[in-house]
Amino acid sequence: MSGIVAAWSPGCDVMEIEEIMTQNTHASVAPEAGARVLSGMQPSADSLHLGNYVGALLNWVSVQETYDAFFFIPDLHGITAPHDPADLRARTRNTAAQFIAGGIDVERSTLFVQSHVPEHAQLAWVLTCITGMGEASRMTQFKDKSLRQGADSASVGLLSYPMLMAADILLYRPHGVPVGEDQKQHVELARNLAQRFNQRFGGTFRVPDPFIPDVGARIYDLQDPGTKMSKSASSPNGLLNVMDTDKQIAKKIKSAVTDDGAEIRFDREAKPGVSNLLSIYSAVTGRAVADVVAQYQGKLYGHLKVDLAEVVVAALGPVRDRAQQLLADPAELDALLARGAQKAREVASPVLAEAYANVGFLPAAP
Ligand code: TYM
């Protein structure tokens, strides 16, 4: 049993839970033994993009050093929009391969596929029943995506997606959820639902904190630096992919939109294009933005772009190559994911049983 679960009893109320939470509110604070993190990334494209890599994966690799870490591929989320089954299968493996290639250590962390752990969908229903319609329809991502898909063709799955995400999180009683900034609202909903459930049915869930990186929490589209980098980018040149060739990376960075004037400084309002390049540089190299700005005083945008291409290729190239090697042996990847699912169920299953009992479901025959 982990430190988190052992230190916390089902009878404790929201106040007590909040007290426990404040002991570990940020990834940079040394966590208590056994403290847990959990996060996931949708298998909705053949490659992760740089936003996923910088906003989430780099953070995951660092938190797995000090936390009991659970990382998963939310394939149930991958069907909220029309999809192709063969693509979904391939992308689920691709995503797993990129996690490992990017530094997720499967000996240390638990890596699994969401649909292999049925407890996620089972808890999602309960959480859906304690979520208000207004609350669900206020979620920014739902509003954006349903607008893009058209109100009539947007699925009910798209609306109930944040409750499934809350279930993903709460089943593991994590302290932290390492995500980029765009997922903060969903983690907030998970926190609200945990508190609501605990108040109505007795303490069951930990109220988790979002762990959002200081740099790179929001990477913007290279062609449209007012919009976040995303799989649904309007131009493929705006999106840097982990699986891109070195040449593609260099070309996209070279053609990135910059701003009027020639000065290289960080100013999101006045210089969104250059500021985005500086954030990427800083996140990929681990150097402070101010330090990078100082290096480029008196230099041209072109200098920054050439060097940025070099550091991004140095970071992503080995991840791409390793992912390709891993994908050459899908049976090994599948075996690894099966082991992960088994470990995940060992944690999720008793938590679901407790939630079901607290909500008033009769115990099923053993
Ligand atoms: P997803 O798949 O859209 O994104 C995966 C992770 O990448 C981060 N991210 C970004 N970070 C910085 N800049 C960007 N432009 C950028 N784009 C994406 C996201 O913040 C995220 O951390 N709903 C989630 C998946 C999910 C999940 C969960 C996450 C399902 N269940 C439980 C945490 C816990 C999603 O769609 O992320």
Image (tube, rainbow, N blue to C red):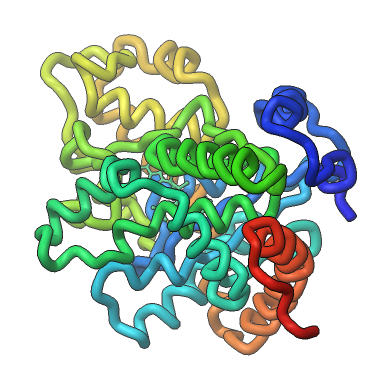
Q: Does 121 appear above or below 351?
A: below
Question: Of 27 and 129, which appears nearest the observer?
Answer: 129
Q: Does 282 appear above or below 190?
A: above
Q: Residue at x 72, y 80 (%)?
A: 364
Q: Does 167 appear above or below 284?
A: below
Report x, y in % for residue 332.
67, 84
Q: Residue at x 76, y 84 (%)?
A: 365
The answer to which quarter of the image holds residue 24 is top right
Report x, y in % for residue 305.
30, 34
> Where does the C terminus fall, quadrant-wise?
bottom right
Q: Residue at x 72, y 70 (%)?
A: 345
Q: Does 53 appear above or below 278?
A: below
Relative side of 80 to 189, left or right = left
Give the number of marks: 0
Report x, y in % for residue 144.
20, 47
Relative side of 197 to 247, left or right = right
Q: Residue at x 54, y 25 (%)?
A: 287
Report x, y in % for residue 91.
42, 74
